[in-house]
Image (cartoon, grey):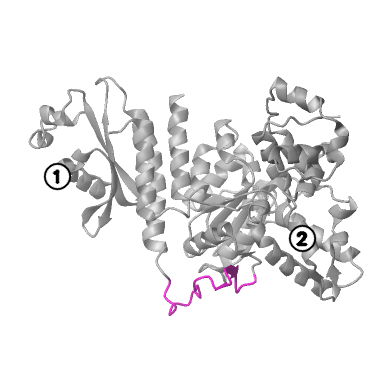
Amino acid sequence: MKKNGEFVAIYEISKILTSSQSLLFQSFRESLKILNIHLKLQKSLIFIRKGQDPILLAGCGNDQADNHFSFYYFFIEQVLKNGFPIVVPDIHKEPCFSSDISHEEDGTEEPISLFCLPIRYERECIGVLVCEKKRESALEPLSETTLTLSLATNLFGQKIKLSLDNFKPIPFSQNLELPPPPRKNGDIQLKNNSGVIGQSKQMQAVMDLVYHVAPSRTTVLLRGESGTGKEVIARTIHYLSPRKEGPFIKVNCSALPETILESELFGHEKGAFTGALFERKGRFELAHGGTLFLDEIGDISPAVQVKLLRVLQEREFERVGGNKTIRVDVRVITATNKNLEEAVLKGEFRADLYFRINVVSIFLPPLRERKEDIPLLADHILNKIGKELNRKLRITPEALKLLINCHWPGNVRELENCLERAATNSRNNWIDEIDVACRRNQCSSPMLWKKELQVIPTPVVSSAEAKSREETPRSSFFSPLISDDPKEKIIQAMEKCGWVQAKAARLLNITPRQLGYALKKYGIEIKKF
């Protein structure tokens, strides 16, 4: 259980450091606070190298830290010079400490351990993590704390290097052509025609992070449901980077079995296996100098995970059936719609590979959480469909309102299919409400809504409420929804629609998910027939 708590601490820190909402110093302070809580540290400090002298970047803990600075600097300078961690079992037994503070001033007789661990980026030591921990006895082991702090320093190193080096504005005089994202009426319109469109706060935050991370070679993990546009974001990062003149190679890891995937990624030599008649370059070689996009990274087998980890760490590999080491310069972007943290806990995904690919994590929100983008997306999609059909397509306000109120379990991909179907059904250039599939009972998405709603536990209803509902005449629910009581209004709608939640949601002009929350909030039991 203790190890799980330490893993949770690292996971929480990774979420903070990859969030686009937190300021640099605030994110480090919040990360140190999590370390203090989970590892029971008295204080924790991050020092970074500036010239030849270390400077304090962030700290969290009691107010005695300033009194210990002269003591810390001796060890910090050694760590920055040699790059090796230093662990002092009890600082009270160190002569250089006893001259600064005594046991009485510190107010404790328990041993206090000092941890000074290097913060590295690749092989360069760019800072030091300093922590103090009060131990219950001198027999308490230090190895588990040291291991957890080492994992944290890996995350800190990536964040420090990315923030202090790569987040600087790119001068327009350079030939990178990376101006800040042009905005018009609050929506992002990329000049490279990448297809990223949105005016919602969620998409603005995504694109801000994309513009920050694009100039670097940092590994990026794209997360989100299927159909949210992870490949579009990956292409945008590539075209906004200095590698834009290089190749953009994509691989769907879930579409290939293990043996074929290994050959696809790393290539194979002639005669490596039956059917290998020629030497073949893998996707890593083909992406040299550019970007490799690995979609559905959570579906790769443990054997391929090991080889992928080596490539990410060493930037080198051997082809299948070969012994020649090949070095490549590739920026890797991965994507998944799975819960990788749960997969790590189950042993289905390597923890070291998880931390290697999860340097910068970008979460793409589902379409139902950014409905203000639907009008822009619909206009963009209809323009694209209109060019293919040689028609100038438009959508009526009634049809647009219907689209906005839909749940969209398939996200943008489902919206594209819906509009293409509606354009085919339309007899003129206007997409009307009747042209939309759900108005003609031809939409299969409600089946997916029901699947999602079934995972919500059925709320407990008091016997008095149940009895009052049974005594209520059913005929009264088929009258217009004129009740001012929200709970009664929901019950009326559900009864009128035969307890079909998708229909009741349309009647109430809300989404099925909102209806599910309302049913849970008011304790309304779902009747099944």
Type of the residue with mark 2? Glu
Rounded to the nearest whole Å, what is the CA distance between mark 2 and mark 1? 63 Å
Residue drawn at x 70%, y 40% is 485
Q: Which mark is residue 275?
A: none
Toward which corner of the image does residue 421 lie, by quadrant? bottom right
Q: How many C-alpha atoms fall within 10 Å of the one at disc 2: few (<14), some, or many (≥20)? A: some
Type of the residue with mark 1? Ser
Q: Could one spot residue 442 in this view of the protein?
A: yes
Toward which corner of the image does residue 2 lie, by quadrant? top left
Q: In the figure, 345 relative to 384: above or below?
A: above
Relative horizontal placement of residue 98, taking residue 122 as reference (left or right): left
What is the x, y in percent for residue 192? 61, 72
Q: Which mark is residue 416?
A: 2
Q: How many C-alpha atoms fall within 10 Å of the one at disc 1: few (<14), some, or many (≥20)? A: few
Relative horizontal placement of residue 342, taking residue 481 as reference (left or right): left
Q: Main secondary structure of the magenta part?
A: loop
Q: Is residue 182 magenta?
A: yes
What is the x, y in percent for residue 330? 54, 59
Q: Which mark is residue 70?
A: 1
Residue drawn at x 53%, y 59% is 205
Residue drawn at x 27%, y 19% is 139
What is the x, y in percent for residue 203? 58, 59
Relative horizontal placement of residue 179, taking residue 463 as reference (left or right): left
Kindly indicate whether the residue at mark 1 contacts the one at mark 2 (C-beta within 8 angstroms): no
The magenta stretch is: 170-193
